[in-house]
Amino acid sequence: MESGKESVSKELITYSNEKITYEVATRILDIVLSLLGIVFLIPLLLVISIWIKLDDPKGNVIFSQTRVGKNGEPFKMYKFRSMYSDAEQRLANLLHLNEAEGAMFKMKEDPRVTKIGKFIRKTSIDELPQLFNVIKGEMSLVGPRPALPREVQEYSEYDRQRLQVTPGITGLWQVSGRSALTFEEMLELDLQFIRNRKISGYIKILFRTMIVVLKLENAY
C-alpha cells in the first residue's frame, strides 16, 4: 500500500507544460467568471446579507476563517455566516459527535447552524463570497476544498498532496457525493483531479456543480 502512495506522490510533483497551460487558462476563466457572477448576483447577495443579520444580529454577515491554500499557505476564506456567533467556542463540546471520518468535522444536524444557515448551506449560497477569494488568487472556481489548519495538522504525507494546487469552491468530490463521502473518498477524488487536470474537466465540473446544487443533495 505504501509503494502505491509513493508512486502517486512522485507523479504529482512533476509539472508538465500541459499543467502550466491549465493553470494559466483557468486563472483567466476564474477571474472572468467570478466577476460576472458577482455582478449578476448582487441583488441576491444583498437579500441574504439582510436575512442573516435579522436571524442573528450579534454576528457579522460575512464569516472569515483561516484555511490552508496552495503549498500550505494560510489565507482568510470568506463565507456567508451560517452559524451562531459563538460557534467556534461550542465546537469542543461537539467533537465527540463528529459524523465524518479522518481530518474533518461534519454533523448533519449541527446545533450551531442558524435557520437561514440551514437554507444557504443546502443551496450552497453560503459559498458565494468565495468569489472574492478567487479574484484575489487565493482560490480557484475548481479545485480541492481548502482545509482547516487543525485538519492539516492531522494529514499524513500522502494526504498533504491535496495542498499542491490552488483550492477551489467546487471540485470533483463535491459533484460525486458532497458531504456523504468519507475523508478517504474525498482525498482520492481530489488526487484524481490533481493528476488529470484539464480545461475540459474544469468546465465539466462547473456544469456538474450547477446540477448538484439544483438537486440539493448531500449538502449540510
Image (tube, rainbow, N blue to C red):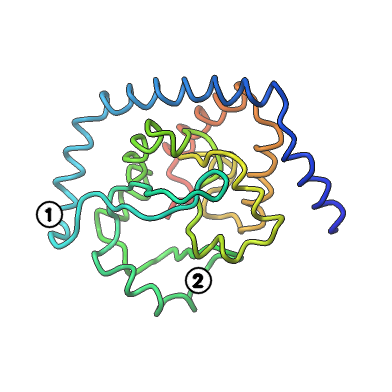
**Left or right of 84: which side holds 155?**
right
Q: Is residue 214 left or right of residue 23?
A: left
Q: Position of residue 65 (x, y in %)?
A: 36, 55
Pointer 2 residue: 98
The residue at which mark 1 appears reads as 54
Q: Is residue 93 left or right of residue 151?
A: left
Badge 2 or badge 1: first in the primary sequence = 1
Q: Is residue 166 above or below residue 2?
A: above
Residues 120 and 143: in front is 143
Q: Element at badge 2? A: loop
Quadrant of res 129: top left
The N terminus lies in which quarter of the figure?
A: bottom right
Q: Does the residue at mark 2 contact the one at mark 1 (Cβ under 8 Å)?
A: no
Residue located 27% across and 24% down the image:
40
The number of numbered badges drawn on the structure is 2
Q: Tell me the CA gap for discs 2 and 1.
A: 29 Å
**Numbered mark located on residue 125 in the image:** none
The image shows residue 80 at horizontal and vertical percentages of: 28, 48
Q: Quadrant of the C terminus?
A: bottom left
Can you give x and y, in whole percent of width and height, for residue 82 in the image? 29, 55
Q: Residue at x 29, y 28 (%)?
A: 38
Q: Is residue 172 left or right of residue 11?
A: left
